[in-house]
Structures are given as C-alpha cells and as structure tokens.
Amino acid sequence: MKARILLIEDNEQNRYLARFLLEQGGHEVLQAETGPLGLEMAARTRPDLILLDIQLPGMDGHAVARTLKSDETLRSVPIVAVTSYAMAGDREKCLEAGAEGYIEKPINPETFLSEIEAFLRPRA
Amino acid sequence: MGTSAPKVERILEQAQSTEDRLPDDQHNRRARHKDAEAASAASASASPIPSAAALADAEQTLRSEMLFSETLLESLPGIMYFYDSTGRFLRWNRNFERVSGYTAEEIAAMHPLEFFAPQDRPRVEARIAEVFTVGESSVEAPFQTKRGELIPYLLTGRRVEYHGRTCLLGVGIDITARTEAQAKLEQSERKYRELVEHANSIILRWDRAGRVTFLNEFGLRFFGYAEEEIIGRHVIGTIVPKTETGGRNLERLMEDICARPEAFEQSINENVRHDGERVWISWANRIERDERGEPIGILSIGTDITARREAEERLRQSEAHLREAQRIAKIGSWELDLSTCRIKWSGQTSEIFGLSPAHSSGTYQEFLTFVHPDDLAALEAAHRAALEGSARFDIQHRIVLRDGTEKVVHQIADVKRENGVPVSLAGTVHDITDRARIEAERERRHRAEAADKVKSAFLATMSHELRTPLNSIIGFTGILLQELAGPINAEQRKQLEMVRSSARHLLALVNDVLDISKIEADQLVIAREPFDLTASITKVLSLVTPQAREKGLAMHVELPSDLGQMIGDQRRFEQILLNLLSNAIKFTEQGEIGLIAERLSCDASTGQAAVNVRICDTGPGIKAADLEHLFEPFRQVDSGLARRHEGTGLGLAICRRLTQLMGGRIEVESEWGKGSTFSVTLPLAVRGN
C-alpha cells in the first residue's frame, strides 16, 4: 500500500536518509524543515502518516504533535515520533503529546521501513 | 443575844452621844417618830401597873432597844422604809432621804410608787402586793430620785403586823455596780457574739467525736445549712468530704489533727457545701482541752480560698501556657532596663542561650558576649537606631553559646518610653537556627536542582548532537550495504562494513556515556510494565548466540519455560543481560558461556519474589584484588586486555546502577584463570523511581 508520508525534520541529511528509505517502499514523501511549515503542509496535503522529529528548532515536536491532535481534520493522522533524546520519560512525553509511535535515532536502515509501515492504516 | 450584850451596851452609848450631837433636823425627825413612841407608851400602859423601879427599869430597857434599832437602821448600807398597806410611810432611815433627795416632809406625803419611773411601777406594784399577800417579795428596779436619777436597786419587802396594821418593811441595796458589771459583760458577750456570728470567716467548733457543736451564721450561710441541719452531725459527710478531689483521704482528719496539732494549726482542705459544690478553705485549728489537758474538741476558723486558688491556678496555667508556647515556638522574651542596663528574660530565652533556667537576668554587656563577633556592630547599630526611634529593633544575628554552639536568632523589640524618654526595651528572641538551616539547605537544593537542569539539558543536547550524525553514518552505510543505492564490489563492502562497525561501536560508547551520565544525574527513569521473563531472556540470547558461535564458544542455557512475568523495565533488564553476556563472550577465548535463570519465591536477602540470572564463562577470571573495583566506572581491569577488548569500561558500572535502581543486586564470583560467574537478582515487582 503506497502512502503519503509527511516528514518533519530539520537535519537535511537525516531528511534525505528517511526519504530515501521511505521511497524505497514506494511511498510519497513530503518534507518540512520546521514545525510551523509541517503543520501548514499537513493541513494542506492531509498525509497518511507524519514522521515527526522531536528536536526541532523553535516549535518542538511535542508542540507540533499537540497542535495536530487538536485539529479536527488531522486528529486521525498517525504520528510517529523520532527522537535522539532517549532521556528519562521521553517516550511517555511523546505519547502524551499524541504520537502513536516512537522511534529512537539512530534508525536502523534495515528495519526502518517496516517499523513505519506498521503504523499506516487504510485511508479513510 | 446574851453574847452580844456588851456590844449592845456600846451601841447604846454611841447612840446617846450621837443624840447629844444631833443637829436640829435630827431632833425634828425625833418628833416624826412620835407614833412609834406612842406605840411604846401604849404597849407599856397595857401591862399591869409596875412598880416605879420596875417602870424605870422597863423604860431604860425600852430606851436601849429603841436606841439599838435606831442605830441599826441608820448603819444599814442601804435604804430602809416602812409603810402601811395604804402606802403611807411610817418610818425610813436617813439613807432613804439622802438617796431619794426628798425631805422627811416630802416623803411623809408621798406614795411608795412615786419612787419609781412610770414604766417600772406596775412591776413594782405587783411585788408590793405580793408582800402583803404572800409575806415577802423582792424586785430589782431603778429607784427614782427627786432629781429624776434612776439608780438600780434590789428591794426586799417583808410583811409586818404593826399595832394591828399590816405594814411593809423594806430594805433596798444599791446594785449599780453589779448591774453595770453585768451590763458590761452582756455588752462584751454581745460584741463577741456579733463578731462570731457576723465575722466573714467560718467559725466552727467540733467535738472529739467529730460532731459539729457550733457553726457561726457566716459558716451556716457559706455551707448552706440551717443550724438544726448541721449541729450534732459529723463533719465528715457534711462539710468535709470523705476524700478530696485530689484523692487525699480525710476520714482520719480528726485523729490526724489530735496526733499532730502543730501540723494542723494552719491547714488547707477541700470542703463541700450542702449542694455538693467543692470549695477550698484555709483553716486555723486550735485544740480545746479540758482541765486535765485532754482534747475535747477543735475550734476551727476558716477562710474560703476557692476563688484565690482558682485565680492562682489560672495564673499558673497561663504561665505554663506561655512557657509552653515559648518552648514550642522557640521564642523567648526579655526586657532591658535602660537605667540599670540589666536584662530579665524568660526560661525559653535561657534555653536558647544555653543557660540554666535559674539564670534569668544579667547585664547588657553579658548579653553582648554571646553575640557573634561579626554581627556585633550590626546589633549595636540596631539598638541605637531603636532608642533614637528611627527604626524598630528587628534584627537577625548569630549567637555563640558558651559551649561553642552557633545559633541564629531573630530579635524584635519595642522601646518603652515615659514622657518621651526611653526607659526600657522589651522584646522576643526567636531561635531560627533550624529555619536558617532549612533555608540554607533549600538554597543549596535549589542550586543543585538548577545544576541538574543544566546537566539534563546538556545531556539531551549531547545525545541529540551525537546521534544525529551517527544516524546519517549508520543509515547511509546500511543503505549502501543493502545495495539500495546500487551494486557495490567486495572491497567496497569490506570497507563499508568497517565504517558500520566503527559507527556502531561509537554509538555503543555514546550510549554508555549517556547512560552513566543519566544515572549520575538522576535522570534515568525505571519503567514499571509487565513483561514475560522467558521471552525477554530468549530475545537477549538470540542476539549474542551468533557472536558466541563465531568465536567457537558453546552456549549452556538453563531457562525454565515458565519464569512468569516481571513488572519492571524490560529494556533495562535486557540491557543488563546483554552487557554481561557480551562481556562473557568478549573475554572468553575457549570453552563455554552459561546462562542459568530461576525464579525465587522468596529472595533470602529481601524476602520478596525474585528472578535470578547467572552468567558464567570460562574466561581468564578476575584477580581478587580487582574484584572490589570491578563495578566502578571507567575501571576496566587489566589495561593490557583493554586494548584487545574494546569497551568503555562503563558496562559493569551501568549494570550495577541499573540493578540497584530496580531494587536488586549484582554479585560476582571469579577465580583467576578459571572463569567468572555474574549473578543478577531482581525483584519480580520493581519499585518505580
């Protein structure tokens, strides 16, 4: 099943890496560098899944997730948080903010695609 | 009469000589006695005619008798009078005239009742009548003189038949002295009775048997008894309770008082009123004794001190409350007399300054010796400012006790002025040592927390900054090795695998450093979620088994299929096992690696259900000297080995901290050259942090 995935990530190389792997799976990848841009793009494109980096400059991933979940039209879009914090309570914080999934950096390129696809749900 | 004859003679002679010297009025009085003389003459004439000699003799005898009775009458100390039943005076003595102040003519014309005041007349009249009917009587009545004076007299009357007429012979004695004495006595008695009756004290007399024989009016009113209700009754059970509220038994009070009277001269008892109300009375007790000295009763004078006692008790309680309040609040009070420079202070102030409670005053100079030298100037400035009126005395400073203890006190005081002149400084001293310490501690903790936040933020940043490039390196290396970006040759694969291996090692180092840093900064959270132990251990084994196989090491596994669930942090549990197994494989060149897991229903050291996993190897073992430092960070033993065996030296330190955080323990047994066994014991229900 091909999906439209919105990638919100500030690091260019990591964005490229994730896009490369997701496109290997045949998915359409939309990219945003910052939280506000991501929100704007999400509202405009209604993606099937949002891959959200937590350590974003300015508006961080938690705030982006909360904003997405408070939006009627975007509430149902699954969010997978990607974080390199791995600090106390990180996972809980992400889930609290509304993320459905949680992946730690560095990603494993061999399993990354299947991990993401597990969160895809049939299009409404 | 014979024996008194010579006396009679003497009296007669005296009478004769007296008559010779009688003044005219006396001679006149003679004339007034003519009736009597006539009577004598009549009597003499009634007898047979005697001879002249006999007549002269008889006359002589008669004269003597008359002289005798005359003299007798006149020598009587009192008054004498003689009147007939109609009240006509027949005779009286000179005293009667002298006392009454009336002349003989006046008396002769008067009636006996005229010598009495109108109010006394009926009484006297009755007595006079009694004389005439019964024969004699007496009466005490004031004798009224011509001048209207009333003189108390005891009058005695006797009926006398005289020449056929019934007469009254009366004698009166002046009883002024006796009456006055009696009146004085009565007055005195009345005075004392009034004193006793109306004294504002309880006056009680009780006999040897303990019965009330007297209780004054005040006492009756005080205890609420009518006289007839209390007199004759035992004091115990009436005004004295059997036991005091305080428990003192009073039943033997009487015996006690008699046995030790001196101890009871003053005593304070609890008494009881008729209505049951308890009262406190201060008694003065005096034993009354009979002529042989035997105690016959006790005279007790009591004062109600209930109100005083209550006031004293209230004062005592109030003082106790103040003391208690000062003790609890650690606030003492003091007052400095500015004219004498002496300070008086409360017990709590003594306590704060480490002085004995008896030490309750001293000089201002003495107080200054307690002040911390560095705070002295500020204190004196505050003192001056307070006296000048420019600022309230309100200062926090340190004091140094005699034993060297340092305390922090907060003092507040107000200046008392008289006519604008400061006379004293009264204030409180509050021991705020604990509060100051707590504030210092809070400040320290606050700084520590701020530092922790900085540390935490630093760790997060480091984690992010280190992982972001590693994400690229590992990710792209993986993509290339999977040939997702196109085919690669064997050499390229070999080199890319070296990149990936180094990147993975670098990641392991980063992870370990971050882990230990997180633990040190108390930033590591232990999850509490249920997971299956057998499955978890199996997963770890699957990760390390390929490495063991690569090195040609055998795996010996004893893993029950029903270890059950553990509530804890699965990831950290697996991290510990993975670390220990990786170490075992890393350091063992030949032989086997063992894993033995078992469930302990009751861990010997904690008493809780636990899981124990032992990991054994046939590696080089650890020297005894190294064992004690084995779990310390950055302590990989044998630097020679370190070069051969890559690692941060943090693995075991992390394992130990993690097991501790989960409420478990890690132990090691090793023999140099024979191998090591690491044993991890964790409770099945991990406490969260």
Image (tube, rainbow, N blue to C red):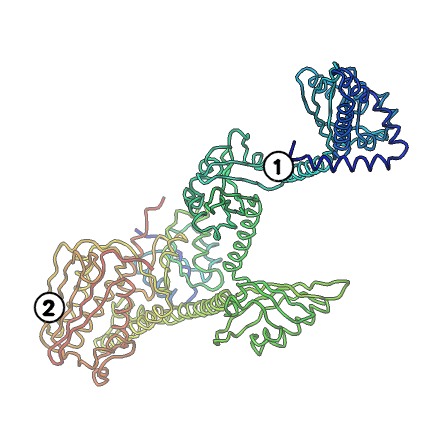
Look at mark 1 in the image and give the residue it sits on: B197
Q: Chain of mark 1?
A: B
Residue B555 got which mark? 2
Percent position of residue B75, x then y: 76, 35
The amino acid on which the numbered mark 1 sits, given as a three-letter code, is: Glu
- For the C terminus of chain A, which image quadrant? top left
> Residue visible at 32% across and 46% down?
A122
Above or below residue B657? Residue A27 is above
Residue B95 got which mark? none
Dot 2 or dot 1, earlier in sequence: 1
Above or below residue B154? Residue B670 is below
Q: Quadrant of residue A84?
A: bottom left
Task: Tell which of B313 and B191 is nearer to you.
Answer: B191
Disc 1 is placed on an element classified as: helix
Task: Tell which of B105 and B150 is nearer to you.
Answer: B105
Q: Quadrant of residue A102?
A: bottom left
User: In 3D space, how far apart are the residues under numbered discs 2 and 1 (Cα atoms)?
Assistant: 116 Å
Horizontally, residue B105 falls left or right of residue B167, namely right
Percent position of residue B112, x then y: 79, 21
